[in-house]
Image: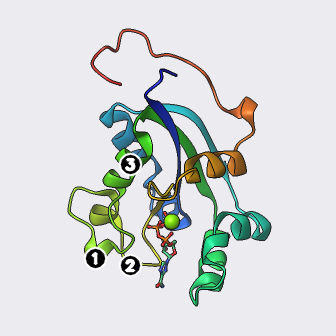
Amino acid sequence: MSHHDERTFVMVKPDGVNRGLIGEIVSRFEDRGLQLVGAKFIQIDEELAHEHYGEHADKPFFDGLVEFITSDPVFAMVWEGADATRQVRAMVGETDPAESAPGTIRGDFGLDLGHNVIHASDHEDEGANVREIDLFFDDEELVDWTRSGTTWVY
Ligand code: RTP
Ligand code: MG
């Protein structure tokens, strides 16, 4: 990991998994030149859901959000690259798919606020990427590696 590189947490939500969008989403990050350093297919339990979405505990949509995120499996990933958290958020789009530009993941695949296909660490919440990576992954589940022969990507 070179000095300008950063790791960020990304997760295909249950709606994206059910719609068969894991491969499409992984491809977009690969195409962009980001580097995969960890991934796993899991079903989130209540406790993990409460920790992950704790910032929204007081919101009216919290119970529905927890019910949804625990309803079916998710595909959790860690991606590395220059300014990765901001880069990924730009590729994801806005929270509401209706506000998301075509070409973004939510702009292309999101249905509504509750079914917006993907989660990514908030780039405006400093340390969110590191907290979320720690919450979902053990250190030994993340791979330190350098791609060979790829001077054209990060
Ligand atoms: P996420 O955390 O899932 O990546 O989404 P985000 O940063 O774009 O949005 P955030 O404000 O963190 O909200 C988390 C998720 O809660 C659902 N939500 N529902 N009904 C509502 O008003 C409402 N607002 C947010 C969305 O699924 C959002 O992704
Ligand atoms: Mg968020």
Q: Which label is found at residue 98? A: 1
- Asked if residue 36 is positioned above or below residue 135 in the image, the reply reads above
For the point 27% across and 74% down, the residue is: 99
Residue pointed to by mark 3: 86
Tell me which amino acid carries mark 3. Answer: Arg
Residue 22 visible in the displayed image? yes
Residue type (three-letter) at the residue carrying disc 1: Ala
Mark linked to residue 112: 2
Horizontally, residue 50 falls left or right of residue 22, namely right
Question: From the viewer's perspective, is the residue at label 1 or at label 3 nearer?
Answer: 3
Quadrant where the C terminus is found in the figure: top left
Label 2 and label 1: CA atoms lie apart by 7 Å
Residue 56 drawn at (x, y percent) = 60, 77
Counting from the top left corner in percent of width and height, residue 37 is at: 56, 31
| 119 horizontally vs 143: left or right | left
Q: Residues within 10 Å of mark 1 (few under 14, many from 20)?
A: some
Q: What's the CA distance linking mark 1 and mark 3?
A: 20 Å
